[in-house]
Image (tube, rainbow, N blue to C red):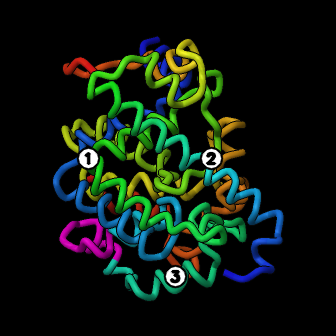
């Protein structure tokens, strides 16, 4: 990692996109886990700092395979 | 009518139909695809494309497709070096893993930790869901650091169609080779939607460039359509 590389907008903007994807995957994993442990959507939403409608909109509609999440 | 409807439905939910190919592969075919992923990982590419499948076919060895390729004087190491020289399909664009490294985040380490605490299956399912989440539900298009992009999609689809057309129940290495050869006849990004082309460009590919598999095979003096015809010689 050198300083010149991180100054470069090309690399920097690519890093932003990659980081955003990483955050999305993390959110997905943790929301999934919380639901498996029986958390309510309201509790999840409060921890994420959004409304429960927003969490429903983003994570709610899922095709559950067999097991109830 | 049904295939068209299925395609439309799949396009609407963002499914590329690749998942339907995996169960149809023979054990040998699965071995080839696994090796293709290994090849991409070793080369440090964030995607698997036709050339990785070709290298994997040669590495896997025990199939008629590999024998055909070897009979024409192709060698894994020579071919791999050739892909570096011709310029792999990947252009100068930055890979997401490299971009994260400039921030001090090691994507490989993140992946290992997440796999340790959540399990491989859960992580893969989460990646998949995030990648396929539509824009209107908070999805962001763009190269993801934790996954390997499948650019050999069209080759796989051609292989599947070819196997079905021949009446073979499963897709083997020969069908995969046929798919790669047929796909390589057209420039990169053929039959892709505008959005997919944009994603291709974000990964550092230049849509419209000649396929590196074709360049490489022609450099070895191999005619693509004749090789494809030799796979299943008509009596």
Secondary element type, mark 3: loop
Which numbered mark, 2 or 3, is in the foreground of this view?
2
Q: Is residue A9 magenta?
A: no
Which mark is on residue B220? 3
Estimate the x, y position of residue B232 in percent, counting from the top left. 29, 55
Q: Quadrant of residue B196?
A: top right
- Residue A6 in the image: state x and y as whole percent: 76, 72
Depth check: give the residue in front, B226 or B54: B54
The chain ID associated with circle 1 is B
Residue B83 lies, with reference to residue B152, above or below; the image says below
Label 1 environment density (alpha carbons within 10 Å; few <14, some 14–19, many ≥20): many
**Residue B62, x across and y down, in percent:** 18, 71
Residue at point 60%, 32% (across, down): B139
Cα distance, mark 2 to mark 1? 37 Å
For image coordinates 74% across by 66% down, the residue present is A11
Q: Nearer the viewer, residue B173 or B198?
A: B198
Whether residue B121 is visible: yes
Mark nearer the viewer, 3 or 1 = 1
Q: Position of residue B214 (x, y in %)?
A: 57, 67
- Residue pointed to by mark 1: B171
* Circle 3 chain: B
Find out whether the residues at labels 2 and 1 contact each other: C-beta distance under 8 Å. no
Q: Are marks 3 and 1 in contact (CB under 8 Å)?
A: no
The span picked out in magenta is B57-69
Q: Which mark is residue B95?
A: none
Q: Quadrant of residue A61?
A: top left
Q: Is residue B89 left or right of residue B78?
A: right
The chain carrying label 2 is A
Number of the front mark, 2 or 1: 2
Residue A20, numbered circle: 2
Residue closer to the observer: B174 or B31: B31
**Alpha-carbon span between mark 2 and mark 3:** 43 Å
């Amino acid at each position: 990692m050198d300083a010149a590389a991180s100054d470069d907008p090309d690399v920097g903007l690519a890093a932003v996109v990659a980081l955003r994807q990483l955050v999305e995957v993390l959110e997905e994993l943790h929301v999934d886990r919380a639901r498996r442990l029986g958390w309510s959507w309201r509790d999840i939403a409060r921890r994420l700092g959004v409304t429960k409608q927003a969490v429903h909109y983003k994570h709610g509609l899922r095709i559950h395979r067999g097991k109830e999440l | 009518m049904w295939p068209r409807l299925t395609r439309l439905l799949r396009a609407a939910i963002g499914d590329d139909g690749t998942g339907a190919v995996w169960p149809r592969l023979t054990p040998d075919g699965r071995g080839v695809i696994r090796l293709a992923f290994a090849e991409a990982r070793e080369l440090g590419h964030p995607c698997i494309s036709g050339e990785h499948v070709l290298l994997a076919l040669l590495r896997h060895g025990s199939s008629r497709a590999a024998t055909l390729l070897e009979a024409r004087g192709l060698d894994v190491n020579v071919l791999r070096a050739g892909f570096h020289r011709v310029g792999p399909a990947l252009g100068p664009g930055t890979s997401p893993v490299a971009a994260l490294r400039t921030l001090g985040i090691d994507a490989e380490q993140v992946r290992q930790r997440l796999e340790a605490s959540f399990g491989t299956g859960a992580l893969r399912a989460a990646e998949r869901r995030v990648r396929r989440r539509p824009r209107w539900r908070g999805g962001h298009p763009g190269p993801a650091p934790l996954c390997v992009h499948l650019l050999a999609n069209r080759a796989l689809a051609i292989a599947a169609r070819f196997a079905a057309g021949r009446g073979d129940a499963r897709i083997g290495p020969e069908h995969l080779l046929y798919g790669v050869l047929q796909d390589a006849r057209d420039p990169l990004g053929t039959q892709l939607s505008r959005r997919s082309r944009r994603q291709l460009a974000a990964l550092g590919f230049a849509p419209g460039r000649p396929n590196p598999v074709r360049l490489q095979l022609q450099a070895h003096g191999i005619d693509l359509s004749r090789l494809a015809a030799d796979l299943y010689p008509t009596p």
